[in-house]
Structures are given as C-alpha cells and as structure tokens.
Image (cartoon, rainbow, N blue to C red):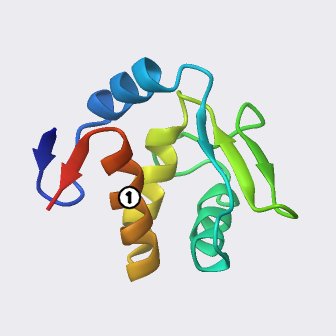
Amino acid sequence: MDTYTFGTCPEHVIKTAVKEQCPDGYPMGNISQEDWTPIANAVNQGIDSHLEAITTRSKFNPNERKCNIHPEELHVLLRRLFEDGSEEAWDLRSSILFTLDIEEV
C-alpha cells in the first residue's frame, strides 16, 4: 500500500491505480445520503480551475445512489472531495483511495 500525507497523493498515482484495478470505471453502489451529497457537489461543479470536469463518461443514478466514475475522471472527484473540506467528503476520499491500495494519513 502506498502512503501519502492527506491530500497529497499525486494525480498520476490515482490514474494508474484506477486504470489497473477498474479499467471499466470505479463502481460505487448503495451510497449513503451522507456520501451522496459531497459526490453530487463535486460532480455539479462543471469545469474547474484545473480546466477539468466530470463528464457523461461517468454515470450517476441519483435515484438508486449508484455511480461508475470513468478512470480518467476519478482523480477529479477525489481532488474536489479534498477541496470540499467537510469531514464527510474527506472520509469518502480516504475510503475510495484505500480501496485502490492508497493511504493518506
């Protein structure tokens, strides 16, 4: 498991991990309302200061609170969760990274 200071995992590490482990996208299901809110906030930002966005390549089903994040876009979601600053968003970021064998402490 790779370990980084919280919020500092390099983008290329995230991209490599998700492409190797989830080439068809990072699936998330049965997302709690507590976790769905920061995801929705991150997705609804549109193009950000990094000139990146979460596009229609990623699929979201708010009725069932399920999603599949495109491998080229997971790093955008994770950066936005970090920038959100809420405990829920940070916990979700840590949990996602942990499933990719990446730890931020």
Residue at the location (33% across, 59% down)?
Answer: 94
Is 68 located above or below residue 95 in the figure?
Answer: above
Judge by depth and name the residue closer to the eye, 77 or 46.
77
Percent of width and height locating residue 24: 62, 22
Asked whether, in this view, residue 35 is left or right of residue 78, the answer is: right
| Mark 1 neighbour density, 10 Å: few (under 14) some (14–19) many (20 or more) | some
- 34 vs 40, left or right, is left
> Callout 1: helix, strand or loop?
helix
Image-quadrant location for residue 65: bottom right
**Residue 77: image x %, image y %?**
51, 50
Above or below for 104 versus 72: below
Q: Quadrant of the C terminus?
A: bottom left
Q: What residue is drawn where x is 44% and y is 41%? A: 75
Q: Is residue 86 visible?
A: no
Residue extending furthest right? 63
Which residue is nearer to you in this view: 27 or 53? 27
**Residue denoted by label 1:** 95
Q: Residue at x 77, y 49 (%)?
A: 60
Query: Residue 90 versus residue 51: which sits nearer the camera?
Result: 90
Give the number of marks: 1
| Vertical side of 28 occupied by 16: above or below | above
Q: Position of residue 44 (x, y in %)?
A: 70, 60
Q: Quarter of the image containing the N terminus?
A: top left
Q: Residue at x 47, y 58 (%)?
A: 80
Task: Please indicate, yes or no, whether residue 40 appears anywhere in the rendered image.
Answer: yes
Residue type at mark 1: give it.
Ser
Eyeballing the image, is 93 above or below 14?
below
In the image, taking residue 101 as reference, residue 71 lies left or right, namely right
